[in-house]
Image (cartoon, rainbow, N blue to C red):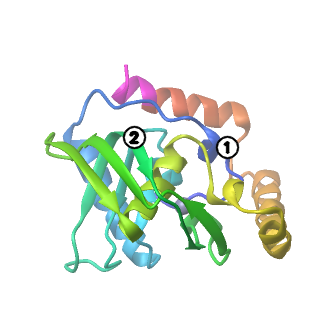
């Protein structure tokens, strides 16, 4: 398992709800936390590891054994309130940071990895991280939400990711769109149908 970078097509795929949680998926979630900690991240969505599933993990402590490990499956966000602006980054665009405006409060319905229902209001920084990860599973990235002036500041860095992706495609490290579509269908067949 590895983190895929912008502009990999799976990051733009709208993930399907999970109808089956098995031992393999639980193991995958553990691996996602490990990858996230290795990258010093606080959130990671399944499609950032090339799995087109409605699932993301968060630990604001960014360190194994510290903080709280949170798993959100099939999340539904509603009742946004307020607005706040803060700097965001992303493990699929490492090094790129920009200001993003989001609601300051959000209601979340979801399941955790044990199948327990999550049904509560999140505020502040955690609400921001949840919204960032939720965007991922809908195929949205934080650079889609930044202003034109912020965009100009990071355009060069984003272009570097695009060039790197093209090079990986040329060398065969990243498969064709058809290969990726087949992979996505196989994962969806296993967990979503
Ligand atoms: Zn991200």
- Mark nearest the camera among 2 and 1 is 2
User: Which residue is found at the position 28% from the left and 41% from the top?
Assistant: 110
Q: In the depicted view, which residue is nearer to us: 136 or 24?
A: 136
Q: Which residue is mark 2?
A: 78
Q: In the depicted view, which residue is nearer to us: 28 or 54?
A: 54
- Between discs 2 and 1, the one toward the N terminus: 1
CB at disc 2 and ligand 1 closer than 8 Å: no
The C terminus lies in quadrant:
top left
Residue 113 in the image: above or below residue 83: above
User: For the image shown, how many numbered marks are present on the structure?
Assistant: 2
Q: Which residue is mark 1?
A: 9
- Chief secondary structure of the magenta span? helix
Residue with the most extreme front position: 82
Q: In the depicted view, which residue is nearer to us: 22 or 91?
A: 91
The N terminus lies in quadrant:
bottom left
CB under 8 Å between discs 2 and 1: no
SS at circle 1: helix
Q: Is residue 130 left or right of residue 70?
A: right
Residue 12 screen position, x and y as percent: 64, 42
Residue 129 in the image: above or below residue 55: below
User: Which residue is found at the position 52% from the left and 61% from the top?
Assistant: 83
- Residue 24: in magenta span: no
Residue 169 screen position, x and y as percent: 77, 51
Quadrant location of ligand 1?
Answer: bottom right
User: What's the magenta region?
Assistant: 188-193
SS at circle 2: strand
Q: Residues within 10 Å of mark 2 (few under 14, many from 20)?
A: few
User: Could you tell me how far apart the alpha carbons at marks 2 and 1 are, in whole angstroms?
Assistant: 27 Å
User: Which residue is found at the position 67% from the left and 56% from the top?
Assistant: 145
Q: In the depicted view, which residue is nearer to us: 83 or 165?
A: 83
Residue with the most extreme top position: 193
């Amino acid at each position: 398992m590895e983190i895929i970078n912008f502009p990999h097509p799976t990051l733009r795929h709208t993930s399907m709800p999970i109808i089956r949680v098995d031992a393999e998926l639980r193991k995958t979630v553990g691996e996602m936390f490990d990858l996230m900690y290795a990258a010093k991240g606080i959130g990671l969505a399944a499609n950032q590891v090339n799995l087109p599933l409605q699932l993301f993990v968060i630990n604001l402590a960014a360190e194994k054994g510290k903080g709280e490990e949170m798993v959100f499956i099939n999340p539904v966000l509603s009742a946004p309130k307020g607005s706040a602006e803060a700097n965001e980054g992303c493990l699929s665009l490492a090094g790129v940071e920009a200001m993003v405006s989001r609601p300051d409060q959000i209601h979340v319905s979801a399941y955790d990895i044990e199948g327990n229902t999550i049904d509560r209001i999140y505020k502040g920084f955690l609400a921001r991280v949840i919204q960032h990860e939720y965007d991922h599973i809908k195929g949205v990235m934080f650079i889609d939400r930044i202003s034109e002036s912020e965009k100009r500041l990071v355009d060069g860095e984003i272009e570097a990711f695009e060039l790197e992706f093209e090079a990986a495609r040329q060398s065969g490290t990243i498969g064709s769109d058809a290969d990726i579509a087949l992979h996505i269908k196989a994962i969806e067949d296993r967990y979503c149908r």
